[in-house]
Amino acid sequence: MTQTAVTPAREPAVRKATPGGARTARRSGRRRLALPYLLLLPALVLELLVHLVPMLMGLAMSFKELTQFYIRDWAAAPWSGLDNFSVALDFDAAVGQSLLRSFLTTCQFTLLSVGLCWLLGTAAAVLLQENFRGRGVLRTLFLVPYALPVYAAVITWAFMFQRDNGLINHVLHDQLGIGDSPAFWLIGDNSFWALLAVSVWKGWPFAFLTVMAGLQNIPRDMYEAAALDGAGVWKQIRHITLPSLRPVNQVLVLVLFLWTFNDFNTPFVLFGKAAPEAADLISLHIYQSSFQTWNFGTGSAMSALLLLFLLLVTGVYLLLTTRGRKTSDV
Amino acid sequence: MAPPRSFLWTRRIVLTLLTGFVLLPVYVMVSSSLKPLEDVSGKFEWIPSGVTLRPYADIWETVPLADYFVNSIVVSGAATVLSVAVAVLAAYAVSRHTFRGKRVFTVTVLSTQMFPGILFLLPLFLIYVNLGNATGIALFGSREGLVLTYLTFSLPFSIWMLTGYFDSIPRELDEAAKVDGCGPIRALFRVIVPAARPGIVAVAVYAFMTAWGEVLFASVMTNDTTRTLAVGLQGYATQNDVYWNQVMAASLVVSVPVVAGFLLLQRYLVAGLTAGAVK
């Protein structure tokens, strides 16, 4: 993945020794030095404007008493030190308590969702590795949830989870006779499972796509050699396919983790502006608590804490996974 | 050697279940979009009893769907073109040049992927308002502001994937172009870009889908005239009633262009991922 590109040794800046040649060489040398920066400039400016500067502002805001009175001129808001953080982290009071609850829900949810997405994606990709009739159709079909716009897909799920006119209750209650009365899916404890179903449905095709791409990098002759040695399909999957996918999986799991943990769209479209307690994922929780109370300072502190947590997890994860890789690569 | 029966049965069962899981909402979307309002408001029916195309006519009346469509196309299209152009330049620099700060650049850009959108939603909103006041360019509530926002969303992944893709293009091609008298920029457009076409298509598909599907910024940063489909679709739920048949019809209509485009171009995405990101 983030392999440092193998760059060729810089061309020696020796030019023909014609009079004035040294000057042109120096000038073009300088131009060559500037060129990569010029190429990067648009990307840099955009990233600075839309991501880095706002992020730093967001961090600064978390130390300010930023209520709706100061929102037009945020710089004028009084500093409040660590007050916002202590409000967010005071787990005995309402704000901190609900933040902690939302964080724990998100952790549980993310673990389950990432695990299932990975499992389904890998299973499908591995089972579709060999050619058989219908393989092309299924490969295309499985990518449909990935291609559908989030809001269109999630609205459909919201319809399916309606208590009185949805498909889920029609099947579970009317056709299979489960439960005395149709269950609520978009409020109450069931909402966790409803959200999980949607999240997995939406997320596993990305795992499928990535693993499928990863499978193409496994040399065919490894399988042929294994087959000659008498290893059957299951053995080949266990001893060749899965180990070869390790580097791909490491990236995949990290990306899925970050996407799921930060997911705002799915709960927002499924539940509207406020999610039920059981499915109150952290992004929507922060959004909701900032915009409901108009206390953006506390909201920013919560975001900063979230970022800190994600950085920590990512750092530890990269440390653990790349260390193993380096020793096996050398 | 033929696979054993245990493998064949596992394959059949798992793939059938997955097909059902994937298709279930698609079936609900299609079948419900063909039902009259009384039917979608009552118990769910697997087979629609009265099929009608009325919802497809009504969706354009209930909300100004056509306007939202145009907004989404303009915003996503512009964001895609710009994002791909910026990513190609940056990836070329990272792949073919050594320079100070290269690692810092790649790490920083990649790590912006992990920022939760909620962290910079409010600051970005304030920046756009202030920039607008200072320069007179309306960024908040305008299509331009949304384009600017969206084009950075796909940028990190695009740069990363294209760098990998460019790395897989033999350097002999650059050298040959140089011998023919091409400068670095000409070499990029004459040699690298054509050779990397699958990767570029893949990145473009990704960028378009990212922009077309975004909800959070679309709901905060648009107004009545610039609203995109992501927000507009919520208009079918009124205080008293949800026009579920129209919601489903509209969902289908807004999905068809992206899904069709994606499925046509998906082999490029796999090719791009194989050469670029997944290594």
Image (tube, rainbow, N blue to C red):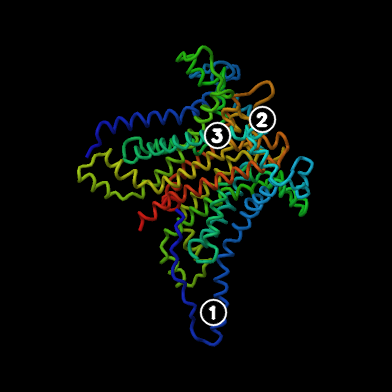
| Side (left or right) of A162 relative to A241 | right
Q: Nearer the viewer, residue A65 or B206?
A: A65
- Give the class, few, some or many, for how many residues have Cα within 10 Å of label 2's Cα (few <14, many ≥20): some
Q: Nearer the viewer, residue B256 or B199?
A: B199
- Give the class, few, some or many, for how many residues have Cα within 10 Å of label 1's Cα (few <14, many ≥20): some
| C-alpha separation, residue under disc 1 versus residue under disc 3 | 61 Å
- Give the class, few, some or many, for how many residues have Cα within 10 Å of label 3's Cα (few <14, many ≥20): some
| Side (left or right) of A217 relative to A79 | left
| In the rendered image, the vertical position of residue B74 relative to residue A188, given as above or below | below
Residue pushed farthest front? A92
Label 2 is placed on what type of residue?
Gly
Per the rendering, the mark at residue B235 is: 2
Dot 3 corresponds to which residue?
A104
Q: Quadrant of the N terminus of chain B?
A: top left
Q: What kind of element bears circle 3?
A: helix
Q: Which residue is located at x 45 percent, y 56 percent?
A: B165
Which of labels 2 and 1 is toward the front?
1
Mark 1 vs mark 3: same chain? yes
Which of labels 2 and 3 is toward the front?
3
**Chain identifier of the residue bearing label 1 in the image:** A
Contact (Cβ within 8 Å) of mark 2 with mark 1: no
